[in-house]
Amino acid sequence: MVTKPRLYSGMQPSADSLQIGNYIGALMQWRDLQQTYDAFFSVVDLHALTQPNDPAELRAKTRRTAAQYIAAGIEPSRSTLYVQSHVRAHAELAWILSTLTGFGEAGRMTQFKDKSQRYGAEATSVGLFTYPVLMAADILLYQTDIVPVGDDQKQHVELTRTLAERFNARYGETFHVPMPVIQQDTARIYDLQNPTSKMSKSAESDAGVLWLLDDPKVSAKKIMRAVTDSEGSVRYDRENKPGVSNLLVIYAALTGRQIPAIEDEYAGRGYGDFKKGLAEVVVAEFGPVRERALELLDDPAELDRVLATNAARADAVADRTLADVYDKMGLLRRV
Ligand code: ATP
Ligand code: LTN
């Protein structure tokens, strides 16, 4: 039997709906990659605890995120799609790896530096500091070959590689050293109202965010109101026309067409026409995804069963790695 190389990725359940940047930048790639990789996709709820959460809302967001993975085409019978906290080994390996991580090393993570500066020292938890160590545990438990992530996570995957190499050097070959696969710039989506900042689940204003679970009419309206410029020609120019360029990237990503072909199609026509065209594309793509997600959420018991079956599959792999780690480090076996 030829075994497929392994892939790991995840997203935080930090909002009720994913936004189309998550879809174009991550889910569309995950969907393709699951054909050729033995893929593990988690909803990283333990990571989400590094932000304040209402317990009932966190539970709901976790289910909603999982439902959107499936609705977007992640197949839970092919890929292992599960909730991070269902697999105990994550928290356990995170502890182990934290004993191998330097204080200064963790302090150099730019995401931690940014966030802790924003919140202030008193409002910054130790959990936020060790966030990348938990992420390393996620990846290393599954002997992962590749980790598709956005550019902002590259440093965390580098730390993961360092920790794997350090462990292997100290205790003998144990972890597979994973490779990051960084999403291309062309897959980066910006806020419709503020097209120089990345579209994000936790944006302050909702006007520039296209949510996967928005009513299609709302999405169409947001596109019609997207910020453009006064030139009036549909042309890709990231520097001088960030708004129009962003809309072109979304159009191209969802249709699989090349940007020049779309520019040609709309040559000599105004932004109104172009936006109408894009709104149709967006509604056609997300209408069915939204319906499928809502259908899945209508039967939470069935969704929970699927997640439990997948967590059991993840457990089997993760427990094996963890047992090996405990042994190698000299933790006494419980008989
Ligand atoms: P948050 O605001 O909670 O940080 P986010 O929407 O920025 O959330 P993440 O949870 O950090 O998204 O990322 C999940 C995945 O989606 C990652 O692979 C990330 O690269 C991708 N992603 C997020 N936003 C975008 C975007 N605007 N364009 C392309 N890809 C994105
Ligand atoms: N930190 C990541 C989410 C994440 C992840 C992972 C991604 C947690 N564990 C393991 C890839 C592999 C983020 O914020 N996008």
Image: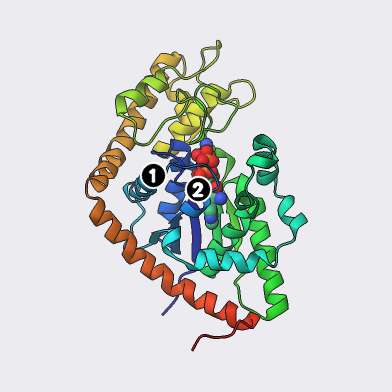
Indicate the position of residue 286 as horizontal and vertical percent values: 33, 36
Q: What residue do we see at 74% from left, 61% from top? A: 102
Q: Quadrant of residue 99?
A: bottom right
Residue ID for mark 2: 48
Q: What residue do we see at 30% from left, 33% from top? A: 284
Q: Quadrant of residue 19?
A: top left
Residue 235 visible in rendering = no
247 relative to 306 in the view: left or right:
right
Q: Quadrant of residue 96?
A: bottom right
262 relative to 241 in the view: left or right:
left
Q: Looking at the picture, does residue 270 appear above or below residue 332?
A: above
Q: Residue furthest right?
A: 104
- Residue type at mark 1? Lys
Residue ID for mark 1: 61
Pointer 1: residues within 10 angstroms few (<14), some, or many (20+)?
A: many
Give the secondary structure at mark 1. Answer: helix
Q: Are marks 1 and 2 in contact (CB under 8 Å)?
A: yes
Q: Looking at the picture, does residue 318 appear above or below residue 295?
A: below
